[in-house]
Amino acid sequence: MAVRLFEGKKQAAAYLQYRLAPHELTSRIMSFMEKKTPKQFNLAVDVGCGSGQGTTLLAPYFTKVVGTDVSPTQLEMALVRGFPANVSYKQCPAEELPFTSGEVDLVTAMTAAHWFDHQRFLQEADRVLRPGGCLALLSYTMDMELEYGDVSNTLNDICKEFYAALLPFRNPYIGSISLKIYSDMFASCSYPDKEWNECLCVKRTLPLSGYIGMVETFSSYQALQQQDPAEAERLSNDIRNKLLSTMKVSSPDTEVTVIVKYFYWLARKP
């Protein structure tokens, strides 16, 4: 059974504010598709779309893009943020997509597939994909890194404290590392034309508060916050203060470079 998370309004708003849109990965997906297919694509479906950061990245390449999510609150946020005219959203489970068989050119899931019923989702993606259509699943590791002047190593030691404190609160459905879930799904995909990519580093310049906010959107932080709100706040404040002290600045608006490590796999239906 799939897991439902990030459905409260506060969590959905934070997801919209802090989660990254990985345009670098969109380029890789389209390059894979264009190897064997003319550059004319009709329909892309972004499953588990959340507030639509990844969904809208597909708009320039397809006649129509549909983002789907089981959470109405997340979809409300997608509507709030605005979107291109060829993008729309539908509420549905990842394992029950409202498309006819063979209708879809691309099925993506961006930092969401680990929460699905993995085999049911793969079967459903196979059903809706046309022959030659592609499946693209991507996510990132928890160990984001920071760069700032000559203190980057010390900052990352502090970041590791943050991640270690949250590790006991990870949902048992995804275990200690979600990469294994994606690796297992890749292995179970029967399409012969497929590729696995374990590390693509995406860099973004953000205020330090943006980095803290991003970590606070993790399911493990949300679990801690639900169990002990005071401890969650104390942990965030402690990490923030340690980072600021190391950077020798006082404002959490000070910009840092955040490095996010993505992994992804692509497959083409025969």
Image (cartoon, rainbow, N blue to C red):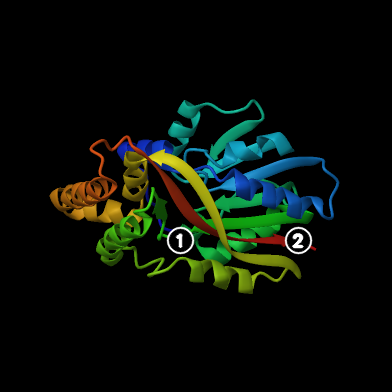
Please tell me which of labels 2 and 1 falls first in the chain: 1
From the viewer's perspective, is residue 151 above or below residue 77?
below
Q: Amino acid at mark 2?
A: Lys
Q: Position of residue 82 (x, y in %)?
A: 52, 26
Q: Position of residue 26 (x, y in %)?
A: 64, 46
Q: Is residue 255 left or right of residue 223?
A: right
Which residue has dot 1 on it?
141
| Kind of residue at disc 1 | Thr
- Inspect this view and state whether residue 65 appears: yes
Q: Secondary structure at mark 1?
A: loop
The residue carrying mark 2 is: 269
Going 28% across and 38% down the picture, which residue do you hit? 252
Q: Position of residue 77 (x, y in %)?
A: 44, 33
Mark yes or no: residue 73 visible: no
Mark 2 surroundings: few (<14), some (14-19) or many (≥20) residues within 10 A: some
Residue, x 35% and y 68% (percent of image)? 172
The answer to which of 121 and 269 lies nearer the viewer is 269
* SS class, disc 2: loop
Is residue 187 found left or right of 34 in the rendered image?
left
Q: Nearer the viewer, residue 68 or 111?
A: 111
In the image, residue 127 sits, relative to residue 182, either above or below, namely above
